[in-house]
Every structure is written in structure tokens, then in C-alpha cells.
Image (spheres, rainbow, N blue to C red):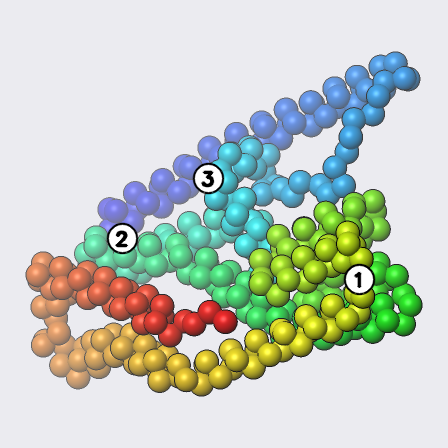
Amino acid sequence: MPIVIALVVFVAVAAAVFAVVSLLDQRNAQARILRDRLTAAQGPAEQTVPDVALLRDELLSRIPAFDTFLRRSERVSLLQKMLAQGNVDVRAGNFLMLCAFSAVVFAVIAFVAGGNILFGWAGAVLGFFIPYAYASHMRKKRFATFEEKFPEAIDTLARAVRAGHAFTTALEMIANEVAEPVAGEFRQLYEEQKFGLPVRDALINLAERLPLVDVKFFVTAVMLQRETGGNLAEILDNLSYVIRERFKILRQVRVHTAQGRLTMVLLMALPPTIVVIMQILNPGFIRPLFADPIGHALIVGGITLQTLGYFVIRRIIRIQV
């Protein structure tokens, strides 16, 4: 219990100090913006206007001090990119706070339930990674939905080009006719080139937002066609056919690896299920596993081996097509 009180006091003090520092930094930032505006207004009229980027830099947090601190880490920028790819409408700073809060909650619950500091640390690690696992799942799910609907978008683009529409007009048609998330990505592609970004750069941005093999093929094919010429409609038809055939092979692979995936699920779920059943039917038999130090070492070893087994089986059944 003293550890729980210490954690609560630490979180409260850290939050108070951070709030005071962020408030002071925000006031300094507002004063700096006012000084810059006054300097620009009082300067000479023939002063050159600096180049302005087309896309604004996204804030990692609404708190200036926290945003400045987070921008020093490349991993946080990658986290913000992952959240955007998964369509998780949370800034990276708020997401890290959510992970910290989840870690504290799970640590307290595990410590109270297990009565040991080892369980508290295990709960903290688990709680910290649960939000990240959710964001990763949403990213993977969105990418899978995009890949399923991407051939339809390519067919729409090929028909529009064959009918005589310009490439940029065909992009707008995809944004209006195809379902999400394809429509949203192509709408952003259309708006980027509409506001002055070269089509090549807009296509590269699309490939960076969606690091998928099919999107890279599409971007490469379109850029080569724009530089060397050729029948764009025929190229897109062939690309759509290749993507559909690849999905057909992927479905066949999933059928052949179904036994391996079922084995992985059974092996991962069997040990915790047995522990829970024994805890209900015969608590005295399973109690030494949680009360004795040797039992704690066995738990750590079992979790480690379970994790290694999961990644080994996952690598075996994961076939790239």
C-alpha cells in the first residue's frame, strides 16, 4: 500500500509541475508570436516573403512545452504517424499520457491482486502496451480494408482515363465514388496537387502514408507513365489484375496455414486457462505458484517461453506473397 500511495503522489506532483511549466511556456510563445507580427508589420515593404510549406507541421501535443519535448524524439514522430495511419484521432502526447495512466491502473490492480511487486511491474508493462496494441490493430485493420478496396479505385481511375478525363479529375472521382478509407486517401492526394504540390510529390506522400506493396506499385507505375509516356489505362488494368490475383493466392495461403494458426491460439490460451480453472477448483494446489519465489521464477520463465513460441509460430505461418 505505501508503494501505491507513493505512485499516486508522484503522478500528482509531476502533473502539477508540468501544468505550471506548460502555462509559462504557452505565455512566452504567445508573446513571441506578437513580437514577430509587430516586427513584420514595421519592416520594409519590399521584404521578401519566406517560402511557406504547403502542409503544416502537426502538433504532437497542444501543450507547447510537451510538444517541444516530444519533437526531439524520432520515435514519437513515428508514433504520431502510426496513429494517423490507423485513423486514431489522438495526438501522440495524449496517447503517451493514456499509456502512462493505463500502466499505473494495471500496476495497482496487479499489485493488489497478486500482493507482490513483481506483479505490479508486470501489470505496468501490460497496461502501457495495451493502448499501443489497440492502435496497431486499428492500423492493420485499416490497411487491410484499403487493400481490399484498392483494386476498385484503380479500375475507376482506368475507366476515367479511358473516357478522356485528366488524371487529376479521375482522382477527384475516386474520392467521391469509392468507399473509405480509399476515398479519404485519394481526396488528400487530390487536394495536395490541387493546392500546388507537384503530382510526383503528392504520390510519394501517398506511398509514405500507406506503406503497402500495392500502393508502391501504383505510385511507381503512374510516375513512370508520366515521365516516359504510354497507355495509362492499360497499365492500371494490368495492375488491378495483379493485385486481385495476389489476393487470391493470399486466401489460399490462409487456408493452408489455418491449422498452424489454430495451434498457435491453443498453445497461447491453454496455460492461462488451466491456471484460472485450477484457481477456481483447487486454490491450494495452485497457490504456491504465486506465493513461493520459485513459483514467481516459473511464471516469468513460462511467459517468456510463451512469447518466444508465439513469435516462432507466427513467423512460420506468415508467408509473404
Q: Residue 147, position in %: x, y?
A: 61, 70
The residue carrying mark 1 is 230
Q: Gap between marks 3 and 2, in whole Å?
A: 21 Å
- Please tell me which residue is depicted at 9% across the width and 77% down the height of the picture: 285
In the foreground, 227 or 80: 227
**Regarding mark 3 in the picture, which secondary structure is present there?**
helix
- Please tell me which residue is depicted at 49% across the width and 61% down the height of the picture: 136
Residue mark closest to the camera, 3 vs 2:
2
The residue carrying mark 2 is 121
Q: Residue 309, position in %: x, y?
A: 27, 68
- Residue 301: image quadrant is bottom left
* Comes first in the chain, label 2 or label 1: 2
The residue carrying mark 3 is 15
* Comes first in the chain, label 1 or label 3: 3
**Regarding mark 1 in the picture, which secondary structure is present there?**
loop
Residue mark closest to the camera, 1 vs 3:
1
